[in-house]
Image (cartoon, rainbow, N blue to C red):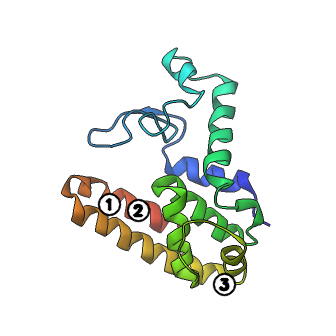
């Protein structure tokens, strides 16, 4: 079965590590370790960030707990057999949302895309070749990113970063 810790370590590198950022044009607004304040204003870690105390062990644990609860658990990470599949699904869930990540995975494995990871989706994920899934999923993600940029040209500045993030998962 897949495990959270290595998936978290890869994802947090993709999110830029444990840093406070505010990138112009990013709809999430201010972020810490990839956690967007606009999307998650009630995250308990903001009290440390707002106090300027970014070295607290509690802050690091709060980040890990957040990603496990909000993304890993929602994609059923512990029930996915192949670490590669769990990692790529988890990373995209963080980037695009759990429902979007699930729907794209369901399309790739040929089950009804309802945005939830249930028994049928888990069976399909666990029954497929992990390398082939990763390749097909990467293509589906790039296609989704292109759609986003075609709909809203202001998001085009993020396209190269999204593609690079996707390609890093394949190496």
Question: Residue 5 placed where, x, y %?
Answer: 72, 51
Q: Who is closer to the viewer here, 124 or 95?
A: 124
* Res. 61 image quadrant: top right
Question: Residue 43 placed where, x, y %?
Answer: 56, 31
Relative placement, left or right, of 4 versus 159 is right
Task: Return the residue at label 1.
Answer: 160
Q: Residue furthest left?
A: 153
The image shows residue 154, relative to residue 79, as above or below, that is above
CA gap between label 1 and label 2 equals 6 Å
**Residue in view at x 52 percent, y 14 percent:** 51
Going from the N terminus, do you reach mark 1 or mark 3 first? 3
Q: Residues within 10 Å of mark 2 (few under 14, many from 20)?
A: few
CA gap between label 1 and label 3 equals 28 Å
Task: Return the residue at label 2.
Answer: 164
Instruction: Give yes or no for contact between labels 1 and 2 (Cβ–Cβ under 8 Å).
Output: yes
Going from the N terminus, do you reach mark 3 or mark 2 first? 3
Task: Return the residue at label 3.
Answer: 129
């Amino acid at each position: 079965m897949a495990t959270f810790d290595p998936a978290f370590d890869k994802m947090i590198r993709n999110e830029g590590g444990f840093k406070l950022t505010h990138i112009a044009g990013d709809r999430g607004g201010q972020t810490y370790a990839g956690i967007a304040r606009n999307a998650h204003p009630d995250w308990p870690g903001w009290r440390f960030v707002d106090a300027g105390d970014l070295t607290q062990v509690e802050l690091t644990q709060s980040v890990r707990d957040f990603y496990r609860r909000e993304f890993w658990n929602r994609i059923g990470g512990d029930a996915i057999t192949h670490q590669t599949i769990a990692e790529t699904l988890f990373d995209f869930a963080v980037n695009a949302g759990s429902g979007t990540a699930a729907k794209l995975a369901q399309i790739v494995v040929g089950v009804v895309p309802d945005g939830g990871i249930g028994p049928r989706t888990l069976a399909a994920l666990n029954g497929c070749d992990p390398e082939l899934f990763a390749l097909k999923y990467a293509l589906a993600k790039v296609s989704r990113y292109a759609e986003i940029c075609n709909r809203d040209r202001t998001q085009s500045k993020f396209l190269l970063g999204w593609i690079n993030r996707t390609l890093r998962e394949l190496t």
